[in-house]
Each structure stands twice: as structure tokens, then as C-alpha cells.
Image (spheres, rainbow, N blue to C red):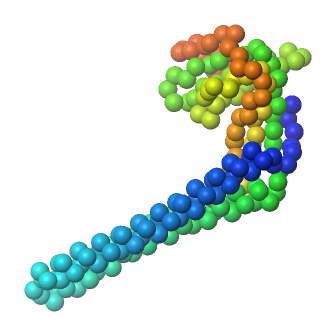
Amino acid sequence: MKLQRPLRDRELKIIAKRLNQLNKNFRRQIWFLLIWTSLAFAVGIFAYFKISTTNELFLLLATVVIYIAIGVWVTGKEYLKLQKDRRSIVFLKNKNLVTVIEVASDLYYELKEQEDEGVYYLFQLPNNKVFSFGGQDFYPNKKFPSDKFEIVEGRGINSEVILLEIFSCGKKIKPVRVIAGQDKWHMINNPNYP
């Protein structure tokens, strides 16, 4: 069953953790800029005492300025990305609305990962329906797959996925069948695939 609901404490904790990670990344970028600029000055000062002509001095100054500009550009680019991510997370938090897919089923097929596409699942639902999902965000763990779980998705300002989590609240179950290798690709490429 698909529904929308407000954020719960567990989702708010995940969002807070991501905001903290963004703050740490920003501090790392500031340290990168400081170290990068200091190294450019240090190399420039060292080279200054080794030059003998005015042309070499101008070349040295231009090189130091270019290196500092590269550091500022990289830091600025990362800063803008971090700010965009922060705005999207805050948007989701203020919107306080996520999409939830609740699944209750003890029958499923597991489509094993062959390269790096992740694991896919086919869960049998009531009324002869099948719920198909998977990818790199859905690897099995000690609680999932289970007979009762929910997939929570939260989107940011530009509809980008900010939050995508599985929360298991049932007992762990084993697949009815595991499909791997070429059989998996034949099934997925079949026009009758769910």
C-alpha cells in the first residue's frame, strides 16, 4: 500500500545525520582551501629566492595566483553543491511529508546481483499482484527481507531523492526462489515482467 505521511523520529534522525555530514564536508573544504593556499604561497616563496629575472618573477606570480584560483574554484564548487544539498534536506524537513510503500508478504523471488546493479525482489501481494523493486539501496541485511517492511522515500526541492530507506518490522524470511545469471536478464527483459 502506497501512502504519504509525516516524517517520523527515525527519518528525522537520518536527516539530521546527513546535515551533520554536510557540515563536516564544508569544514573539510575550508581546510583544503587553507592548506592549498598555504602550499601555493610556500612554494612561491621558495621559488622566489631561486629566480633571477623579472620575467621569471611574473611567471611565478601568475603560477601562484592560478593555483590559488584553482583552490578557490574547487572549494566554491563544492560549497555550492553542499548548499544545494542542505536546502533540499531542509525543504524535506520543513515539508514534513514522505511517500511510504508498506509491504506485507512472506513470498518473494530474489534476483541476484550479477554486476553492480544491486539485488532485485519480486514480492507476491494480494489479488495476484507483484511488487517489483531493487537496486543498490536494497541489499539484504540482518533484518531485510522480511515479511513486513516499508520503503520510505523523501524528495527535495527539485524532486531529487533525499531519503530512501527500508524499515523492517517483521520477521526475516528466505526467498521462494533465487534467480541469478542469464535467467535474471531473460526475466527482466520479458515483456510480461511485472
Q: Is residue 172 left or right of residue 186?
A: right
Q: Is residue 59 left or right of residue 70?
A: left
The structure residue drawn at horizontal position 82% and vertical position 31%, both measured from the top left corner, is: 102
Q: Is residue 61 left or right of residue 102?
A: left
Q: Image quadrant of residue 142?
A: top right
Q: Position of residue 136 (x, y in %)?
A: 59, 33
Q: How many marks?
A: 0
In what quadrant of the picture does the C terminus appear? top right
Q: Position of residue 40 (x, y in %)?
A: 29, 74
The structure residue drawn at horizontal position 70% and vertical position 10%, both measured from the top left corner, is: 176
The structure residue drawn at horizontal position 68% and vertical position 26%, both measured from the top left corner, is: 143
Q: Image quadrant of residue 151?
A: top right
Q: Image quadrant of residue 110?
A: top right
Q: Position of residue 77 (x, y in %)?
A: 51, 66
Q: Image height check: is 172 above or below 8?
A: above
Q: Residue furthest right?
A: 127
The structure residue drawn at horizontal position 60% and vertical position 17%, both measured from the top left corner, is: 184
Would residue 15 be visible to someone looking at this image? yes
Q: Image height check: is 146 above or below 83?
A: above
Q: Residue furthest top?
A: 176
Q: Residue furthest bottom?
A: 54
Q: Position of residue 52 (x, y in %)?
A: 10, 86
Would residue 191 be visible to someone looking at this image? no
Q: Image height check: is 5 above or below 175?
A: below
In what quadrant of the picture does the N terminus appear? top right
